[in-house]
Image (cartoon, coloured by chain):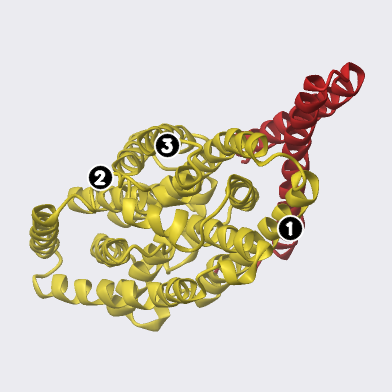
Chain colours: A red, B yellow
């Protein structure tokens, strides 16, 4: 017969997948929000504000890239 | 054995063009990617993804039917059941699970071959049905949550810049989804060929690994199938369920990718179609319930419910027909030739009517 259902893995699926979606959503949301606000602030001549929003966009981009790397690692390291 | 391997690769090809929509429909719909660019990208990443892991292949090969009663004829009949269902649902433009079709076909053939003792019901429920039921629900909720968060973050910004940003994000999420599709679906064919090789006595051992030629041929078949594009299903997934904006497309793809990647990591033979369709519905329903064409969603749900029994019936009938000709290759050969002739007739008829099934529509 086969092995019993791996409830631990199923539980992991239930919490890990939404968490991953949340992380990716927030990360890319920061990129879009930061970049859009930075562009608007820059056009209005508010240099410092534009810089702060650019930092937000950059932080989001780093998080997003990190999420993609984690996804790739999951694919490449499973046994 | 050669006929079975060829049929398995044919299934892999249908799996590719049937599931192209999962990876690229939302990107094409929101114009993040041009149709042909999208399918080329998806086919390359499916090919690469097929080499990344063989964990799902091992799951498919060991847990659904009793390996001791499986013959190459059973595998062949199961594949015919799966291919038939894939073609029927593709013809009607309905996204349905190639994984379930494959499992249903093999289960039906095994039932015809050896009765109910051939099927590991616990395995079917615990390793396939439960994850497959859970996946679309998780994807629906995750994508719904994602789009609500997205609108909260960027809802008051200028739409032009926001849409451009999410179209860019969709290219990344579509790439990840294509890659994860390759890690899941090509491996199902690897698992079936491995099962056939075990049944044929070519491979042995408790957990046989797919040989390199199996991995390469399965990766190639799914990549070619993906490149062919299943435009009818792309249209259904991308614009017929609801007309999505780039943020919704991104949320659906991110939701589907996350569920599939997590499942792939855990070794579940999860349906890409169920995950991404659940995510698409979630991204639409969270914005406005009435935006979703629930009648169409209901048709898709009916197709999902029918997948295993319908593929199973065809698998059982195929096994029965094949068994009339004995244990040799004559039965499978005649059935394979008949199926090819039927497919050629259907394609020929459709091509004479117009290019709707085989080329990218202008509005896709």
Read off the residue under disc 3.
Answer: B38
Label 2: which secondary element: loop
From this viewpoint, is residue B39 visible? yes
Q: Secondary structure at mark 3?
A: helix
Q: Is B285 on the left or on the right of B28, as rendered?
A: right
Residue B296 point in image, percent of width and height: 44, 72
Marks 3 and 2, Cα distance to the nearest angstrom? 13 Å
Residue carrying label 1: B145
Q: Is residue A34 above or below residue B159?
A: above
Q: Position of residue B204 (x, y in %)?
A: 40, 49
Residue ID at (82%, 22%): A44
Q: Which residue is mark 2?
A: B359
Q: Residue at the spot x=22%, y=72% of the render?
A: B319
Tag 1 secondary structure: helix
* Image: A46 above or below B139: above
Kindly indicate whether the residue at mark 1 contacts the one at mark 3 (C-beta within 8 angstroms): no
At x 25% / y 74%, what residue is drawn?
Answer: B314
């Amino acid at each position: 017969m086969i092995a019993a259902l791996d409830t631990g893995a199923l539980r992991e699926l239930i919490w890990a997948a939404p968490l991953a979606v949340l992380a990716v959503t927030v990360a890319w949301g920061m990129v879009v929000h930061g970049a859009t606000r930075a562009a608007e602030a820059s056009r209005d001549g508010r240099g410092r504000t534009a810089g702060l929003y650019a930092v937000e966009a950059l932080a989001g981009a780093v998080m997003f890239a990190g999420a993609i790397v984690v996804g790739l690692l999951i694919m490449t390291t499973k046994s | 054995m050669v006929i079975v391997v060829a049929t398995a690769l044919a299934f892999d090809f249908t799996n590719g063009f049937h599931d192209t929509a999962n990876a690229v429909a939302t990107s094409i719909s929101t114009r993040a990617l041009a149709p042909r660019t999208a399918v080329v990208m998806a086919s390359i990443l499916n090919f690469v993804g097929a080499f990344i892991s063989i964990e799902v292949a091992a799951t498919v090969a060991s847990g659904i039917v009793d390996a001791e009663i499986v013959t190459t004829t059973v595998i062949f009949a199961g594949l015919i059941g799966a291919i038939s269902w894939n073609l029927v649902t593709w013809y009607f433009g309905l996204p349905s699970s190639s994984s379930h079709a494959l499992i249903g076909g093999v289960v039906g053939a095994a039932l015809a071959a050896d009765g109910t003792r051939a099927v590991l019901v616990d395995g079917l429920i615990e390793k396939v049905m439960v994850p497959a039921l859970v996946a679309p629900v998780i994807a629906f909720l995750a994508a719904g949550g994602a789009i609500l968060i997205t609108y909260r973050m960027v809802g008051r910004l200028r739409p032009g810049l926001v849409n451009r940003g999410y179209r860019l994000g969709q290219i990344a999420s579509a790439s990840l989804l294509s890659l994860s599709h390759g890690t899941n679906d090509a491996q199902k064919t690897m698992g079936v060929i491995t099962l056939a090789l075990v049944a044929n006595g070519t491979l042995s051992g408790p957990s046989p690994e797919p040989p390199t030629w199996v991995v390469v041929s399965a990766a190639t078949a799914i990549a070619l199938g993906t490149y062919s594009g299943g435009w009818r299903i792309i249209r259904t997934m991308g614009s017929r369920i609801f007309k999505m904006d780039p943020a919704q497309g991104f949320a659906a793809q991110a939701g589907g990718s996350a569920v599939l990647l997590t499942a792939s990591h855990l070794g579940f033979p999860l349906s890409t179609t169920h995950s991404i369709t659940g995510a698409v519905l979630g991204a639409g329903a969270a914005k406005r319930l009435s935006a979703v064409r629930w009648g169409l969603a209901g048709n898709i749900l009916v197709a999902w419910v029918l997948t295993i029994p319908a593929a199973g019936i065809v698998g059982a009938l195929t096994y029965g027909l094949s068994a009339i000709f004995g244990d040799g290759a004559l039965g499978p050969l005649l059935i394979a030739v008949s199926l090819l002739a039927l497919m050629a007739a259907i394609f020929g008829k459709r091509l004479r009517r117009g290019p709707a099934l085989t080329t990218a529509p202008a509005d896709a």
